[in-house]
Amino acid sequence: MSVKQFAGKKPFPEEGPLPAHIGVIMDGNGRWAVRRGQIRTQGHLEGLNTAKRIVKAASDMGIAYLTLYVFSTENWKRTAEEVGFIMGLVRQYLAAELDFFRQHRIRIRHSGDARGLPPDIAEEIREVCGDTRDFTGLQVILALNYGGRDEIIRGIKRFLEARPSGGELTEASFRQYLDNPDVPDPDLIIRTAGEMRISNFLLWEGAYTEYWGSEKLWPDFTAEDLASAIAWFQSRERRYGGVKG
Ligand code: IPE
Ligand code: IPE
Ligand code: MG
């Protein structure tokens, strides 16, 4: 399905290239549940359904890369119950969706520190990434135990370990030491639940990203909302510090 079909009668121009890489800060699961008198984990369960819908929509729209912010390096501050529940959902998602990934030629990747994850989750991720690595459709990057600062520090450590011969530290050379160096910088980052902050997401890669905020809580976010964000992106004039024209 095209963005036009999704965007329907939205008052945005629908010209210009699609964003190659979209990042999503999937926020508001807890509030969604609490507003319904439910426990926070119920919001994460519903949030997983939204994530599945958005992966399908991005795949149908022909988006090349989608990074989903699943769990930050700061989210360990939450209760053991909530953290355990989220990790359980990740495990369930990876195991249950493999046929879907195959059917849609979706490649799964990871960003973040795998060493800090429960070993079974790290292993599951390794397997799914391996099983889907040759698929040429949408690439879904799961940012799990991910922090932008942590990624930069791990990158610096890897650079120092490798000490590439004659290798000068430049923006371009350093980029090779990020988690997924071949993935282009995000063109568009979407954040739900009305917050306008980065919360440690793609700090290096997001230097010139267009930011789109939605008041909707993540469980309420739809494919049409994604299409609206994309249509808005297509109306943006990106200058990268230069001047118009
Ligand atoms: C986003 O929803 C999911 C994660 C951060 C894992 P939240 O759990 O942050 O929901 P709110 O912000 O408390 O509503
Ligand atoms: C950002 O949301 C992290 C994820 C969506 C995984 P948070 O809910 O953790 O961010 P803050 O605490 O509101 O900044
Ligand atoms: Mg939150």
Image (cartoon, helix red, strand yellow):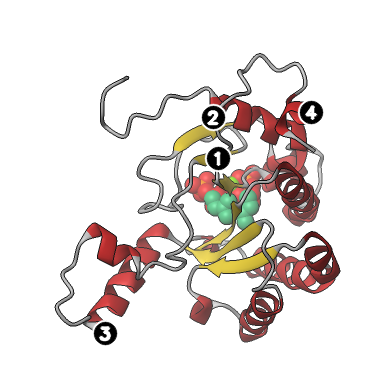
Q: Sequence-wise, which precedes: disc 3 or disc 2?
A: 3
Q: Position of residue 187 (x, y in %)?
A: 48, 42
Instruction: Give the residue type that dot 2 points to.
Output: Phe
Q: Position of residue 77 (x, y in %)?
A: 52, 63
Look at the numbered disc 1 and give the secondary structure of its residue. loop
Residue 220 in the image: above or below residue 55: above
Q: Which residue is mark 1?
A: 19
Q: Indicate left or right for 123 with 170 as reference.
A: right
Q: Sequence-wise, which precedes: disc 1 or disc 4?
A: 4
Instruction: Give the residue type that dot 3 points to.
Output: Glu
Instruction: Give the residue type that dot 1 points to.
Output: Pro
- State the residue at coordinates (47%, 25%): 236
Cα gap from disc 1 to disc 4, whole angstroms: 17 Å
Look at the numbered disc 4 and give the secondary structure of its residue. helix
Q: Which residue is mark 4?
A: 5
Cα gap from disc 4 to disc 2, whole angstroms: 16 Å
Q: Position of residue 116 (x, y in %)?
A: 51, 78
Q: Are marks 1 and 4 in contact (CB under 8 Å)?
A: no
Cα gap from disc 1 to disc 2, whole angstroms: 7 Å
Q: Nearer the viewer, mark 4 or mark 2?
A: 4
Q: Which residue is mark 3?
A: 161
Cα gap from disc 1 to disc 3, whole angstroms: 34 Å
Q: Sequence-wise, which precedes: disc 4 or disc 2?
A: 4
Q: Which mark is residue 233?
A: 2
Q: Position of residue 150 (x, y in %)?
A: 38, 66
Q: Are marks 1 and 2 in contact (CB under 8 Å)?
A: yes
